[in-house]
Amino acid sequence: MKRTSTIQYYHLSREKSPQVKNQGKEKEHMVSPSESVIRNILNYSKTLTVIKTKETGILNLVMN
């Protein structure tokens, strides 16, 4: 299986970004995950087992 990863770099400066400047002026619409998404994540976490070994490192097993 091909491994993929996303690396995110954040540049912190003394100037505030436009999003931070407008937070007090405009109310932003809050978005939250649906109940089914939360249920799927919790079910996945129940079936996931992480094992550390000397030979292969960390194994992630999904027990069905």
Image (cartoon, helix red, strand yellow):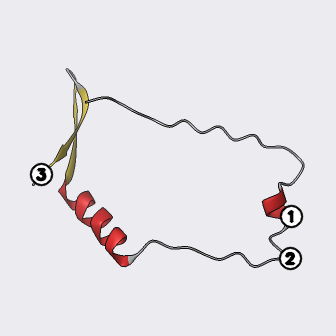
In the image, residue 32 above or below residue 9 = below
Q: Which residue is mark 2?
A: 25
Q: Which residue is mark 3?
A: 63
Q: Secondary structure at mark 3?
A: loop
User: For this view, does 7 lie left or right of residue 12?
Assistant: left
Q: Amino acid at mark 1?
A: Lys
Q: Which residue is mark 1?
A: 21
* Front residue of 31 and 12: 31
- Mark 1: few, some, or many residues within 10 Å (few <14, many ≥20)? few
Q: Secondary structure at mark 1?
A: helix
Q: Earlier in the sequence, mark 1 or mark 3?
A: 1
Q: Secondary structure at mark 2?
A: loop
Q: Are marks 1 and 2 in contact (CB under 8 Å)?
A: yes
User: For this view, does 16 lie left or right of residue 6?
Assistant: right
What residue is at 84 percent from the left and 68 percent from the top?
22
Position of residue 16 measured from the top left corner of the image (x, y, whole percent): 86, 54
What residue is at 18 percent from the left and 56 percent from the top?
47
Q: Amino acid at mark 3?
A: Met
- Mark 2: few, some, or many residues within 10 Å (few <14, many ≥20)? few
Quadrant in which residue 61 is drawn? top left
Q: Residue furthest top?
A: 55
In the image, residue 62 above or below residue 25 = above
In the image, residue 50 above or below residue 17 = above
Mark 3 to mark 2: distance in Å?
A: 49 Å
Position of residue 51 measured from the top left corner of the image (x, y, whole percent): 21, 39
Q: Are marks 3 and 2 in contact (CB under 8 Å)?
A: no
- Mark 3: few, some, or many residues within 10 Å (few <14, many ≥20)? few
